[in-house]
Amino acid sequence: MTKFQLNGKQVVVEADPTKPLLWVLREDLQLTSTKYGCGIGQCGACTVLVNDRAVRSCVTLVGQIDGRNVRTLENLDDRLGASLKNSWVKHSVPQCGFCQSGQILGAYSLLKNEPQVAAEEIPTKLTNICRCGTYKRIHEAVESVAKGEE
């Protein structure tokens, strides 16, 4: 049994503690914004926030998050989250959209922990993969929020 905060609510999950958090979120808790991409923690489609830090949920075991705070895109409704979502639309970031949940959560973690990140640092600090290659728009959207334009 694992207990943690999920999107502001206490949850108890009766799952094998070695089950990846990704599958607990999708299968057990029906939160489907978190996507399966590579299964080895490289692409970032499965990114969620654990204590406001971006983590790859496909390689994070549910037993590792006991007592922690987990957030998914479904709960990213504070000022920073809303600003990022608005900037994503303004900069026409999504193409296929598959990676966008992980991209936004990665950007949220970056800006939450480094609100004044320099534009030239954004490409090296956001490590999620976009198979459509919309990196320029992603970086512009994040830079816009960092500058307080959103």
Image (tube, rainbow, N blue to C red):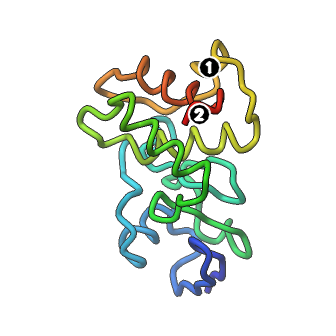
Q: Which residue is mark 1?
A: 124
Q: Position of residue 84 (x, y in %)?
A: 51, 42
Q: Work out which residue is located at the far top of the displayed protein and give it.
A: 120
| Crowding at mark 2 (Cα within 10 Å: few <14, some 14-19, many 20+) | many
Marks 1, 2: nearer the viewer: 2
**100 relative to 28, above or below:** above
In three-dimensional space, the C-alpha distance between marks 1 and 2, rounded to whole angstroms, equals 17 Å
Front one among 48 and 113? 113
Kindly identify the residue that appears in the image at 66 percent across and 82 percent down: 3
Quadrant hosting residue 96: top left
Q: Residue furthest front?
A: 149
**Local SS, label 1:** helix
Residue, x 68% and y 66% (percent of image)?
64
Give above or below for 40 relative to 82. Answer: above
Confirm or deny contact between disc 1 and disc 2 (CB under 8 A): no
Q: What amino acid is labelled 2 in the image? A: Val
Instruction: Name the residue: 57% across, 38% down.
Output: 107
| Percent coordinates x, y for residue 128 in the rendering | 49, 33
Q: Quadrant of the N terminus?
A: bottom right
Q: Amino acid at mark 1?
A: Thr
Q: Quadrant of residue 69?
A: bottom right
Q: In which quadrant of the rendered view does residue 49 lie?
A: bottom right
In the rendered structure, which disc, 1 or 2, sits on the residue that comes first in sequence?
1
- Residue at image mark 2: 145
Residue 73 position in % (x across, y down): 47, 57
Please tell me which residue is depicted at 62% across the width and 47% down the height of the picture.
54
Local SS, label 2: helix
- The residue nearer to you, when weighing 139 against 145, is 145
**Residue 76 x, y percent position in the rendering:** 53, 58
